[in-house]
Image (cartoon, rainbow, N blue to C red):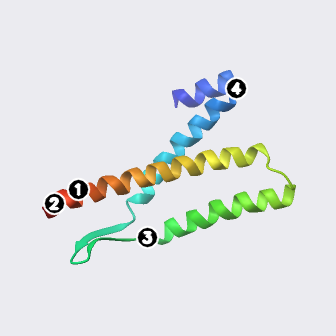
């Protein structure tokens, strides 16, 4: 919360981008918990969830639609891209963490 207040007070665009990446990362951590990961004879198998598919389609649809409607790339796309970057960083960090724990448990 203090980061949000600080960014709001100084009005820095890079501060907002950093804040959105952090918030997106927290969302990615949360979303990764909905994935099913298991160790089987084929190795480590992961299935994606419906919330993942909805978020992926949502981000893609939102960025493409805004660009088509406006005919340019507005600052809003920069913010959506920052959220999406954080989302993917958080999601992949959690998936790698779970992957490593499954490898350790299987040996």
Instruction: Return the mark for residue 11.
Output: 4
Residue at the image point whose x is 56% and y is 48% from the top = 85
Direction front: furthest residue: 42
Mark sitting earlier along the chain (4/3)? 4
Of labels 2 and 4, the one closer to you: 2
SS at circle 2: helix
Is disc 2 in contact with disc 1, using a CB cutoff of under 8 Å? yes
Residue at the image point whose x is 63% and y is 59% from the top = 59
Q: Identify which residue, 4 or 94, lies in the foreground.
A: 94
Instruction: Return the mark for residue 105.
Output: 2
How would you rate the neighbour count of disc 3 (Cα within 10 Å): few for under 14, some for 14-19, many for 20 or more? few
How would you rate the neighbour count of disc 1 (Cα within 10 Å): few for under 14, some for 14-19, many for 20 or more? few
Mark sitting earlier along the chain (1/4)? 4
> Residue 3: image x %, image y %?
54, 28
Left or right: where 81 falls relative to 3: right
* Alpha carbon separation for disc pair 4 and 3: 38 Å
């Amino acid at each position: 919360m203090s980061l949000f207040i600080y960014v709001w007070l100084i009005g820095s665009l890079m501060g907002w981008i950093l804040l959105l990446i952090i918030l997106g990362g927290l969302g990615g951590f949360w979303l990764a918990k909905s994935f099913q990961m298991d160790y089987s004879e084929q190795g480590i198998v992961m299935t994606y969830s419906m919330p993942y598919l909805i978020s992926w389609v949502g981000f893609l649809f939102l960025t493409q639609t805004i660009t088509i409607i406006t005919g340019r790339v507005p600052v809003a796309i920069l913010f959506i891209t920052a959220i999406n970057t954080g989302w993917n960083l958080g999601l992949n960090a959690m998936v790698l963490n779970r992957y490593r724990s499954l490898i350790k448990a299987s040996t």
